[in-house]
Image: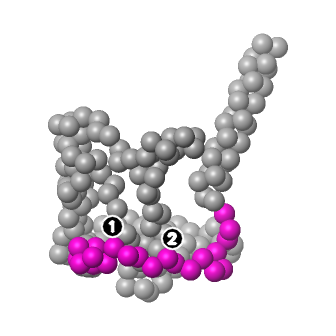
Amino acid sequence: MDAPERVALIRPDGRLAVQWRGGTVAQATAYLASAPKSNRAGLGYWAAMADVLESGSLPVPMHLRNAPVGRMRSHGIGVGYRYPHDFEGADIAQQYLPDALAERRYYVPSAEGLEARIGERLERLRAEREAGADRPRPRSKAGLPKVDPMRTAGGVMKARQGKLAKIAETQKSDAGS
């Protein structure tokens, strides 16, 4: 049997479950049906939507804004952003929400299942930030590919748009023939 006929699932307890062909959908269904459930992500989503309805469009913090032109940075746009993955733990004290919502917490994990562990981690990170551990240590980049992900993503999007434009042009030309 080749790889497309096998599906491996690593369960939260670390064990590996392998299923062959037809049983894959059944296994996935049983797994999802028996997995612990939570509505906390949904509650967070709807709380955020309620804030959008109440507050409307609020300004994005200046350090999160894109500054494709150098002179924009002289106005404070894009200045001060720290990419979390450049630091150990990939967590730094940085405001992501608009000023009016800066203190809001939308996702509050339950004390059940894996969410309990997620909640413990979030609480630990929050406590570290509040304790002044705001001097994150830069993460070593040794062994990582040397790539600018945003520049590459922009190039990929531009290439896709170019290919789509050529396809549309060909279709238009073919339709006129």
Q: Is residue 75 left or right of residue 109?
A: right
Three-letter amino acid code of the residue under disc 2:
Asp
Q: Position of residue 147 (x, y in %)?
A: 66, 63
**What kind of residue is marked 1?**
Ala
Q: Which x, y percent locates residue 170? A: 78, 25
Give the vertical position of 176 relative to 144 (above or below): above
Q: Is residue 66 visible?
A: no
Q: Is residue 130 left or right of residue 4?
A: left
Q: Which residue is mark 2?
A: 86
Q: Secondary structure at mark 2?
A: helix
Query: Residue extending furthest top?
Result: 176
Q: Which residue is mark 1?
A: 93
Q: Main secondary structure of the magenta part?
A: loop
Whole-angstrom CA distance, mark 1 to mark 2, is 13 Å
Write the start and end of the magenta stretch as one range: 127-147
In percent of the image, x 28 and y 47: which residue is there? Answer: 98
Above or below, comparing residue 46 to residue 38 in the picture: above
Front residue of this view, candidates 25 and 80: 80
Q: Residue at x 57, y 44 (%)?
A: 70
Identify which residue is drawn at 24% across, 43% down: 49
User: Could you say whether the residue bearing mark 1 is in a helix, strand or loop?
Assistant: loop
| Residue 130 on the magenta span | yes
Q: Nearer the viewer, residue 18 or 107?
A: 107
